[in-house]
Image (spheres, coloured by chain):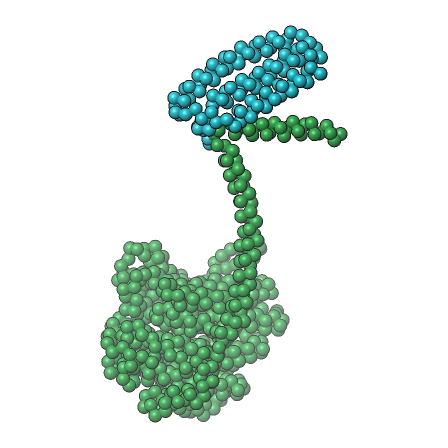
Amino acid sequence: MSAQVALLIPLFPFLAFLLLIFGRRFWGEKAAAGIGIIATFASFAVTLPVLWGSLGKGQTITWSIPWFHLGEKAVFLSMRLEPVNVLMLVIVSGVSFLVHLYSYGYMRKDERFTVFYAYLTLFTFSMLGLVMSANLLQIYFFWELVGVCSFLLVGFWYFKPEAKEAARKAFVVTRIGDVGLFIAIALLYWHVGSFEVMDVKAAVLNGKLTPGIITLTAILIFVGAVGKSGQFPLHTWLPDAMEGPTPVSALIHAATMVAAGVYLVADLFFLFTASHQAMNVVAYVGGFTAIFAATIGVAQNDIKRVLAYSTVSQLGYMMLALGSTGYVAGMFHLMTHAFFKALLFLCAGAVIVSLHHEQDLRKMGGLWKTHRWLGYSFLIGCLAISGIPPFSGFFSKDEILESAYADGRTGLFIVGVLAAFFTAFYMFRLFFMVFAGQARGEKNREPVPRVMMVPILILAFMSIISGFFNTPGDRLAHWLTRTGTATISLEHAPVWISAVAIVVAAAGIFLAYAMYASERISPERVAKSVPWAYQVVYRKYYLDELYRAVLVWPLKGLGWILTGFDRFLIGGLVYLSAWIAQLVGRIGSRLQNGQAQTYVLISLIGFVILIVGLTAGRLFP
Amino acid sequence: MQLTSYLALSAILFSIGLYGVLTKRNAVIVLFCIELMLNAANLNFVAFSKFGLFPGLTGQVFTLFTITIAAAEAAVGIAILIALYRNVQSAEADRYDSMKG
């Protein structure tokens, strides 16, 4: 398996992007969708031999060419496919292919269908490029590129003011994190003298970097990951990003791009394991985000927003795992989450299509009778995310909890268990409100197109079986840690953790059943008994309002002051000079009126001034 | 003190002429006023040739030339005026504004 073949993986979507964007007036819907689907399928097909090579023969493909010179030093374009990169390649290309297929049904009859596919293929290219890069500068390059694609796709329906706002917010908030990442890369280059990940790793392992620098850069890189992966306190853009089309939410804001932060931490894990403080930061931010977002998800009424908060919460889980040295647990959960969250989003998209673009949970219900297959798929997704065996989420979440426990973080372990309870509760609240009972709003249901059901069923299948990649036998763990990446040993983890996780998840499901399916407990009564708690959670802990008051408004005020300065002071001076020139011109044109008498008068005045000047000079010797 | 009174008369005549050239709307009167200014100059010539520092005939000869040229000028001026009147249908000086930029 040569490196040239692996380079084809991002090349296919890039070619598709060029074809689509330049021929956007030329291609019809079928041709455009065909180009996107074939390109991503080709990428996926090429990843399979790479995966086989890595799994079977333990092959690590490397490739590197000089890119440009920075002073004396050459910067390389390089690629290095270690197990973690190969795993990401398979996830990204696979989910991307399924979403391209699904979009053909979801985006049908949209005016800018071809442009949508062009952006989607550009995103796939950037994301594949990101996970293949072995060079920090290159990583940053693709990191920004996926951000741009996210911006373009969230704001795809730019005629909706909410979508425009959300796109801007997504761009600006993630940019705050990106600054941290950029500073970290600059610091590493300064101290190591190379952008290559391998050189940085060697420098860290040889002790060439001081502990202070390691901690600082690790935390700054984590700041970048916080922005991209929607961790507290920069998570606010992710729920708003749900204004984009649902396939975009599934691909970018659930399965791949938001996991890029987790991937980055995993890819530079040697840096984090070298610093105890950095690991603490990662673990605590992750754990807090997991419980924080899960509680918000309980009170949201928009189907996609619930899923968005669930994504934030699950990403928090992954960070918690990584922070507890649970390298395998974090990447394992990233993989299973990519499958079941993409599944849930695609199902939500199908629900939205069948209800004529209704997204309010309170107006849904009773879909089980008419859309049985969709119901099964959604149920599989819910069971997987809640952590019910034998679905995939159980295994990965269990590993995370065991990692946290084995790392001696008992507090975070309890937080994780609590978050699991909330996860199960809000997911099944969602499920029962959509599928159980009677239809509350739209009665006239559309059938879901077959082209949308196929990816859903494939993902449902993956959500069931992907848990068995690691259990029994820890095959995934052996593969991922083959290159010597540190991870925590779970051999002595107590068995009761699994039992606790299952019981807690079952309790959440049962509570959701009692409140939303059998209606033995009235949700309104519960909300009314603790009105302040309900309000706080419903308003997402007032974080958006807080940011608006503390950051947005002062900055806007400063902007206004600067605008006023610019417009009235600088602009005033410019206008004044223009006005003087205009005045002179106007007087001049008044004089040139073509009447000989005026000309004579002016010559006379000039003459008088001349004479007075000449004679007056004599008076002052 | 003879010279001063001549010069005063000449200055008054010149000023009246200048005033007329600048303010009158009728082009014929403007021409007359130019004649007035020329004659003020003539008066100066004659006065200086008689009472100046170097009395002589030169000033008077110049005056004769000036009168001749004034006659020619009046003839050409009137001719131009008539031609203009045919084109513009007016003898008003402020209607002649084709020089306007």
In the foreground, A461 or A320: A320
The residue lying at 47 percent from left, 17 percent from top is B77
The part of the image, by quadrant, that contains residue A606 is top right
Q: Position of residue A243 (x, y in %)?
A: 38, 70
Q: Position of residue A88 (x, y in %)?
A: 41, 71
In the foreground, A599 or A357: A599
Above or below for A496 versus A279: below
The residue lying at 42 percent from left, 19 percent from top is B82
Is B97 placed left or right of A464 in the picture? right
Is A382 placed left or right of A577 in the picture? left
In the foreground, A420 or A79: A420
Q: Position of residue A367 (x, y in %)?
A: 27, 81
Above or below for A529 versus A274: below
| Visual hue assigned to chain A | green
Q: Is residue A465 visible?
A: no
The part of the image, by quadrant, that contains residue B56 is top right
| Visual hue assigned to chain B | cyan
Q: Position of residue A407 (x, y in %)?
A: 53, 84
Is A539 placed left or right of A109 in the picture? right
From the image, which quarter does the C terminus of chain A lie in? Answer: top right
